[in-house]
Every structure is written in structure tokens, then in C-alpha cells.
Amino acid sequence: MMKRRELREHTFKLVFSALFDTCFPEESFEYYFLDNDISGADAEYIRSAVNGIVSHLGSIDEAILRNTKGYTFDRISKICLAAMRVAIYEIFYIPNDDIPGSVSISEAIEIAEKYENEKSKSFVNGILGTVLREFEKEV
């Protein structure tokens, strides 16, 4: 069984790759899982998270755009966008006692820094921090 951090990173990679496809076919999961030796509960968790992100993309992207003053999606790097989508999905749709919002943000920052650069972490942190505060006010 993988650690949650590893599951989140695999989810990020699939969400990132989906940014370049007009659709995300079921075979994409199977190829990815085979290439990365992922099976069982780990594969199901990742599949469920990616499908959840795709099905809630409208509300997730709305939260991003609402908090990126003056930015449009074409100005946001695809790495930051994918990392934020994973974090916002966790904040909005996974119970807080399972994954605290602060953990989702921290992990998204680490992913953005790992796959992009140091500057991306402050951008991701700023957007996700605001999204989390808004969400906590509503709940």
C-alpha cells in the first residue's frame, strides 16, 4: 500500500496528462498503472480521485479563477493548475478528518516546486490558502 503522498503524486501526473487530451479514456489508467506497477486499492484510489476531479472540474476551476486576480488559465502553468486541481478536490470533496486542507495545500506546493520551480510554490500557496479560507467559512 502506497503512502497518501505517493497516491497524490500519481493522481497529479494523471490530471496533468489529462490537460493535454480532449478526453481521458479508461485505457490511460490501465497503461499508467501497468507502467508504474500500481494495482489493487492504490489503483482504485487514484482512479477515483482522477474521476472525481474530472466530474467536479467546473467547481474546482471556478474556485481557481475566482482567486487568481487578473489571471486566465492560459497564464497559469499546467503543473500549477494540475496541482491545485488535486488539492481543491481534496479540500472540497474528501472529508477533513481524512485529509486536512492544510495537508492538501502543503502537498500541492511540494509538487509544484518539484515539477516546476521555487517561484510556483508561492503562487500555489496563495491561491489555495484563499480557497481553503473561503471553503471553511461556508462549511
Image (spheres, rainbow, N blue to C red):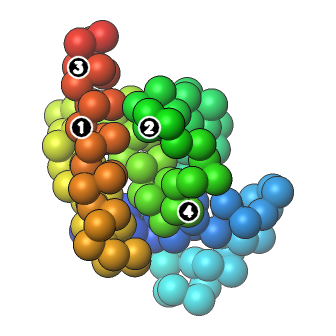
Residue pointed to by mark 2: 68
- Judged left or right of residue 21, residue 84 is left
Disc 4 residue crowd, few under 14, some 14–19, many 20+, Cα 10 Å:
some
Disc 2 residue type (three-letter): Thr
Quote the CA–CA distance across marks 3 and 2.
19 Å
Badge 4 vs badge 3, beta-carbon distance below 8 Å: no
Q: Earlier in the sequence, mark 1 or mark 4?
A: 4
- For the residue labelled by badge 1, is the local secondary structure a helix, a strand or a loop? helix
SS for dot 3: helix
Q: Is residue 128 above or below residue 31?
A: above
Residue 129 got which mark? 1
Sooner in the amino-acid sequence: mark 4 or mark 3: 4
> Gap between marks 1 and 2, in whole Å?
12 Å
The residue tagged 4 is 78
Upstream in sequence: badge 1 or badge 3:
1
- For mark 1, does the 10 Å Cα neighbourhood hold few (<14), some (14 to 19), or many (20 or more) residues? some
- How far from the left and from the top, in percent, is residue 18? 67, 62
Circle 2 sits in a helix, a strand or a loop, which is it?
Answer: loop
Vertical order, 25 against 117 (above or below):
above
SS for dot 4: helix
Q: In this picture, is 23 found above or below 20?
A: above
Q: Is residue 90 visible?
A: no
Asked if residue 70 shows in the view, the reply is yes
Is label 4 in contact with label 2 (beta carbons under 8 Å)?
A: no
**Depth order, front residue of 134/74:** 74
Q: Position of residue 52 (x, y in %)?
A: 56, 42
Q: Residues within 10 Å of mark 3 (few under 14, many from 20)?
A: few
Q: Amino acid at mark 3?
A: Glu
Kind of residue sitting beneath label 4? Lys
